[in-house]
Amino acid sequence: MLELDQLIQEAHVRAAASESLAALDEVRVHYLGKKGVLTEQLKALGSLPAMERPAAGQHVNRAKQAITELLDAHRHELEQRALAKQLASDAVDVTLPGRGQDPGGLHPVTRILERVQALFTSLGFRVEEGPEIEDEFHNFDALNFKPAHPARAEMDTFYLKDRPLLLRTHTSPVQIRALLKHGAPLRVIAPGRTFRHDYDVTHTPMFHQVEGLLVDAGVSMAHLRGTLTDFLQRFFEKDDLKLRFRPSYFPFVEPGAEVDISCIFCNGTGCRVCKQTGWLEVLGCGLVHPSVLETCRVDTRRYSGWAFGVGIERLGMLRYGINDIRMNYENDLRFLRQFR
Amino acid sequence: MKLSEQWLREFVNPRATAGELAERLTLAGIEISSVTDALPAIDKVVVGEVLKVARHPQAGKLSICDVRISAGKQLQIVCGAPNVRTGMKVAVVLHGGRLPDGTEVHVSQLRGVESQGMLCSARELGIADDHSGLVELPVDSAVGKPLVQVLGGADKVLEVEITPNRGDCLSVLGIARELGTLFDLDLNLPQCAPVKPTIKDTLPVNLAAPEACPVFAGRIIRGLRTDAVTPLWMRERLRRAGLRCVHPVVDVTQYVMLELGQPMHAYDLKQLSGGIVVRMARAGESLQLLDGNTHTLEPDMLVIADSKRPLGVGGIMGGTASSVQVDTRDIYLEAAFFPPQTISSRERKLGVQTDAAYRFARGVDPTGQTRALERATRLLLDFANGEPGPVNRVAGRKNAAAKLVLRQLKLRQLLGIRVPEREVGRILSRLGFRTRKRAHTWEVRAPSYRFDIEREEDLVEEVGRVFGYDRIPAIAYPSTQRMLPLPEQQLPLARLRDILTGRGYQEVITYSFVDGPLQQRLTGGPGIALANPITTDMTEMRCSLWPGLIQTLRYNLNRQQKRMRIFECGMSFIPQHDEITQENILSGLITGSQYPAQWGLPQRVADLADLRGDVEALLVASGAAERLEASAAPHPALHPGQSAKLYLNGVDLGWMGALHPILLREMTLDQPVLLFELRLEPLLHGRLPKLAPISPFPSLSRDLAVVVDERVPAATILGLVREAVAPQPIEVYIFDIYHGPGIDSGRKSVALSLILQDSSRTLTDEAADATVKHVVRQLQDKLGATIRD
Ligand SMILES: [Zn+2]
């Protein structure tokens, strides 16, 4: 008996000393293998007197079970230890930066253009484009710019060499093209590049506008004010944004107006940006001049319309703080990446 | 235009501050862009009388003056001005006073003599540029009176921005009329009563071009004092309006122009021979104008001439030869009307800009000539004496103002509000319209000075702007009942932009005009030239976006940005005989390493295949990536061995390649630059996906390496493989290209991976092997390929 207890004790010590599964298996073979100590003991039972055999067998089997259990327990522990070790060695520095391509981004002018388009398409305006090299008819004549009128000279137009063509000075010619193509009723916006012979902090020879046009029955200044209020409040995400209509002159609208918004930086109390006036000029607009509608063969007894034109760089200046609009076209990556 | 508030208030004087006037005018369409003080801060400056002038014992150029500054008070002041003399009235800065430039004046010692104040020049006082001597105040100025009062008192200057349709507002009278309407006040007009002629002299006037000059009025004035000086108050008003004083007669004509809006001209009578002829210029005539240049006149220019020669260009500028001089005693004063249409193009041709032309181009009252002559005569005689002759006014046919009808209904319909009828009548008549009320309408005739009133809508604006745009409510126009069409087979451009930005590209926007020589280097042909480019490196419309992208590259390389992935989408302009094709294109440029510097990824310079991957990605959205064909072709901008013309479904799509090494060298670029340029239109053809059945049968993959002639394009190999397997589906890709040991020079090994499938049953290994065998045979037969084990 003592012998078996000693054996279990000894197996315990040997198992505990096993550092690997292989070593542990050697211990198992030593005790429980075909020629193992306990196996030999069981074989030796036959030499015992029959009376003693059952009790002795029981003892040996109990010892075998005890050793099997302690070996299993230790195997489990070794496996746990191995797993823990593997997990530990698998650990990575999760703070390392990710790998791969670095995404680019859109130009700020595109961001603004898309924002304006999204707002107007949600109101059912379709997007129209027109050519950037235009003729006098679409850029001036059809828009009620009289020949030799100072308003025409004030446009600082680029002309082509040897061709009777020019670079459009505004997106308004698209009004003409869209009306001639689709007729009334119509609601379109026309985003695009425009060109004027001018270069300083607030002017680049190329810039972007979005033109808006709505022609339908009974359209009034009140409707113009309604849509522009909606647009500018949504654009600047300020539901308390106020609009101020100042009478102004654009040959293709009558009545015409310039629109100021309450300063978004000081809420109208006066600051450096609004030059203490509380107002910021944002766009020009008006009711489409009847002679423009007539040129486009729209029945002016039935229809009237409004139009507006807004400078995208101006919106970018107010929204993103791009105060020197020349930066838009230097394309410095350190500038552009801020608008990703 | 700058205007004195004081002057304006002589015409109409509302109970409101200058700031309030500015705001009301601005909100009525007369924009006041600034309101500033008319006088600089001049405190403790008074009128003094020089009683005695003595030479400074230590300094020859300095004088010691005794100056009386009040009844019983005298100061001793040291002064260096050459024009100081006894009896002169001067501006004296007292002890403790301060000049506009900040200089403080104290009692001080000047070379050993005490000076108890300072005598000033006009420039020191900030009221004119003159610094040649002391400002000489009128002899009747009261000694001790503050200078500010002598100069007409404190005042504001309004800077007015007049839109080109409102020529009638380019005067004190015009702005006053607006204010009178806004505040419902009558105007006090200045004294313009006829001045009784004291001599009979007149010049005959022949209106030989009545279309270009329908009204011409003039008068002779003889015997003006040559020592007359423009009164200080008039000089001050001119200064506040931003004009310089030139000559008493000219100053008066300028004053009247500012006040009434009628430009005038004065001739030296002795330079005129015979009468005045208003005619078109004759071919070959030339004339020295007051700008100092001799201009060759063209037959479409109107001249004011005498019987011998042209004197000036009508409505634009007078000539030097007949202009008034310091010693001019007898003058001929002219006030004429030139219609707006004829002015601006002539002004441009002559390359001059004058206040007169500015006004005539925007419209001057055709009935205001006599009034202006009388006003000018009165002002001139008041300080320069002279004997006026009678006014001689010659006029062509007068156009009566057209009758317009304003309907109450239209007014309400366009403004979206109802303006009370009484208010409509009041506004129109205050503005000078003659109105007659009918039931629900008004019959309206515009005043002679309004050139912008042609139809009913113009009247609507007049009523609306005075009534106040801010009284118009905001009303949403009812939205349409139908949604916009949304063609699914038309891709939005935003989708392509997103693909590129996702692949690391930054969008740029470059100018549509580019450097001509650079563009010609890059495209091989001239683009469309501008007649008036803004700079010498923006001379041509771009026919490719590459010049702009390359400029952007250089700009950023100069700022230490060595790795770049940029794209732009925009219009190109391609000359085709008489036509111009304006087409949207999408172009990109990459340079530097393919990936940003990072750990665990070796740096690798981007190459053409990287670029092509981006081009293919753009086509995925339209489902056309497999139909992209690239064939080697030369392009002036590209490396001859790395240049491909691209086709989509057999149609021209664009180009891709590496920038030519010679161009790299010319532009001192030391790293490869890869470019693509694609027509946008084909890229936007989307597709409507139709689900194809997904095979339930497993696929088998086989790898194979074939050795072929180096020049065999990969596209040919892939095409042959697909063709050999058709109609069974196959995915095939190249996983390696190898040159080197084991491969003959001039040949290359192409390793292919084939993923085979049978759409109707499970593909067996035997069937797969048979297919590969067939593929190999095709490659052997058609390309002379050998198989590499
Ligand atoms: Zn502000």
Image (cartoon, rainbow, N blue to C red):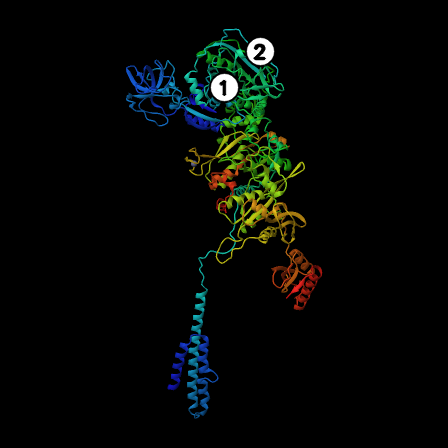
Residue B153 position within the rendered picture, expressed as x and y whole percent measured from the top left: 38, 20
Of the two numbered discs 2 and 1 in the rendering, the one whose residue sits closer to the viewer: 2
- Of all chains, the one bearing label 2 is B
Residue B527 position within the rendered picture, expressed as x and y whole percent measured from the top left: 62, 39
Judge whether B305 appears above or below B526 on screen.
above
Residue B16 position within the rendered picture, expressed as x and y whole percent measured from the top left: 41, 25
Q: Which residue is mark 1?
A: B257
Residue B289 position within the rendered picture, expressed as x and y whole percent measured from the top left: 54, 20
Judge whether B703 appears above or below B347 on screen.
below
Task: Assess disc 1: are there few (<14), some (14-19) or many (≥20) residues with their C-alpha within 10 Å of its C-alpha.
Answer: many
Residue A70 showing in the rendered view: yes
Q: Quadrant of ligand 1?
A: top left
Task: Assess disc 2: are there few (<14), some (14-19) or many (≥20) residues with their C-alpha within 10 Å of its C-alpha.
Answer: some
Query: Residue B433 vs residue A182: left or right?
Result: left
Q: Amino acid at mark 1?
A: Met
Residue B145 showing in the rendered view: no
* Co-location on one chain, circles 2 and 1: yes
Q: Nearer the viewer, residue B405 or B88?
A: B88
* Mark 1 sits near ligand 1, with its Cβ under 8 Å away: no
Judge whether B542 appears above or below B82 on screen.
below
Judge whether B533 appears above or below B171 on screen.
below
Q: Picture quarter containing residue B511?
A: top right
Q: Which residue is mark 2?
A: B275
